[in-house]
Every structure is written in structure tokens, then in C-alpha cells.
């Protein structure tokens, strides 16, 4: 019996170690700094300035496209007390006819470090840019039916050229992936 208890403890410890390693590795993702030397260089003040048109879709974790949408964005920047502050006014139109509006206020805290707020963002979005990439992390309060659900976004934007940026965001709740949002931004 003692032999089984010792063996059982070793197996449980071993399995626990594997589980911990797997859970930690699944949380690990790319670091925005790895794109530092890759161009074109993304400058939010330059790209998100003026009118931008975007098309996107929400893909459920099983692969089904659940919603498609178009976004018209009007963006501008100003100086407030020595800080660059941007306004990104987004007008969404979904394939089912629903319309939504989100107005972001984005502050450049230091070169490549951003903070964003909007009415449906819980707390503040935190973003870091390096090279051609920007990574935003935030919690969004989404309307679903008559309720609202707080879901987390891990949002990656990659500048392709002066006019095109691609965006992939993983949406999750309680650490479980719900799906992805894919967006293509186009400047006229």
C-alpha cells in the first residue's frame, strides 16, 4: 500500500507539472517587441488619422462565421498638456442591419505605449506598438440579447502598407476562447 501511495504521489506530481507547463505555454504568445525591426513602422497618429473603412467578421471557435460587418471610422489627434490624444469614432453596420457606435479616446503615454477608453470598455485598454504591430488588451461589455457580457480581447493589428492594416482579435471569457474577430482596415 505504501508503495502505491508513493507511486501515486509521483504520478500526480508529474501530471500536475505537465498540466502547469501546458497551461503556462498556452498563455504564452508573441511579444510585440519581436516586430521592432520589421517595417513598415506603425505610427497610430499617422494611420488612424482621417477616414478609414474596415470590413470584418466574427468567427466562432468552431469556425462558423457568425457575423459580418463594415465600419466607417473618423479619426483625429490633438495635444492635451503635452500628451497626444486621439479620437476614433467608429460607426458599425452589421450584416443583419444592426448599427452600433463606439468612440475611442486614445492617449499615447510614451512612444509605443497607449491607453484607450470607450463607453463599452471596462476599465482601460492597454496597448503596445513596435515595428509594424500593435497589441491591445481590454475588456469589452458586449450586448447579447437583453443582457451584457464582459469579454476579454487580445487584439493584434499589423500594418501592411500605408493604406492597409489587418487585425486579428481573440475574444475570451474566463480564459475560454469564444472566437476571433478578423478586420481589414483600408485608408482611401
Image: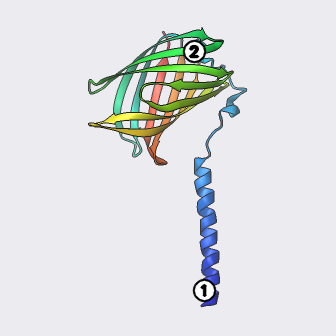
The quarter of the picture where residue 134 lies is: top right
Q: Nearer the viewer, residue 148 or 130?
A: 148
Mark 1 or 2, closer to the camera: 2
Determine if residue 170 is in view. Answer: yes
What kind of colouring is applied to the model shown? rainbow
Residue furthest to the right in view is 37
Label 2 secondary element:
strand
Residue furthest to the front in view is 81
Determine if residue 162 is in view. Answer: no
The quarter of the picture where residue 96 lies is: top left
Give x and y (percent) for residue 102.
41, 22
Residue at mark 1 to residue at mark 2: CA–CA distance: 64 Å
Give x and y (percent) for residue 186.
48, 16
* Label 1 vs 2, first from the N-terminus: 1
Few, some or many residues within 10 Å of mark 1 (<14, 14–19, 20+):
few
Question: Image point 69% across, 34% down: which residue?
Answer: 34
Give x and y (percent) for residue 20.
61, 59
Q: Nearer the viewer, residue 20 or 120?
A: 120
Q: How many marks?
A: 2
Above or below residue 90? Residue 140 is below
Question: Image point 51% across, 19% down: which residue?
Answer: 105
Give x and y (percent) for residue 17.
64, 64
Label 1 secondary element:
helix
Q: Quarter holding the N terminus?
A: bottom right
The quarter of the picture where residue 18 lies is: bottom right
Question: Image point 39% across, 30% down: which residue?
Answer: 57
Q: Residue 63 shows which numbered tag?
A: none
Q: Which residue is mark 2?
A: 85
Q: Which residue is mark 1?
A: 4
Q: Nearer the viewer, residue 78 or 16?
A: 78
Amino acid at each position: 500500500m505504501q508503495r502505491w501511495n508513493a507511486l501515486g504521489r509521483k504520478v500526480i506530481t508529474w501530471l500536475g507539472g505537465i498540466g502547469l507547463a501546458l497551461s503556462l505555454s498556452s498563455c504564452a504568445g508573441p511579444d510585440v517587441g519581436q516586430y521592432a525591426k520589421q517595417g513598415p513602422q506603425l505610427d497610430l497618429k499617422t494611420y488612424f488619422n482621417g477616414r478609414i473603412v474596415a470590413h470584418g467578421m466574427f468567427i466562432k471557435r468552431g469556425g462558423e462565421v457568425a457575423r459580418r460587418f463594415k465600419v466607417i471610422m473618423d479619426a483625429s489627434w490633438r495635444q492635451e498638456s503635452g500628451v497626444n490624444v486621439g479620437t476614433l469614432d467608429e460607426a458599425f453596420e452589421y450584416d443583419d442591419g444592426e448599427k452600433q457606435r463606439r468612440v475611442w479616446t486614445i492617449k499615447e503615454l510614451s512612444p509605443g505605449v497607449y491607453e484607450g477608453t470607450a463607453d463599452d470598455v471596462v476599465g482601460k485598454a492597454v496597448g503596445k506598438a513596435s515595428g509594424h504591430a500593435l497589441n491591445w488588451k481590454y475588456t469589452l461589455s458586449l450586448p447579447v440579447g437583453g443582457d451584457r457580457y464582459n469579454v476579454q480581447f487580445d487584439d493584434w493589428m499589423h500594418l501592411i502598407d500605408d493604406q492597409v492594416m489587418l487585425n486579428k482579435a481573440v475574444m475570451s471569457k474566463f480564459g475560454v476562447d469564444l472566437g476571433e474577430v478578423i478586420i481589414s482596415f483600408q485608408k482611401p
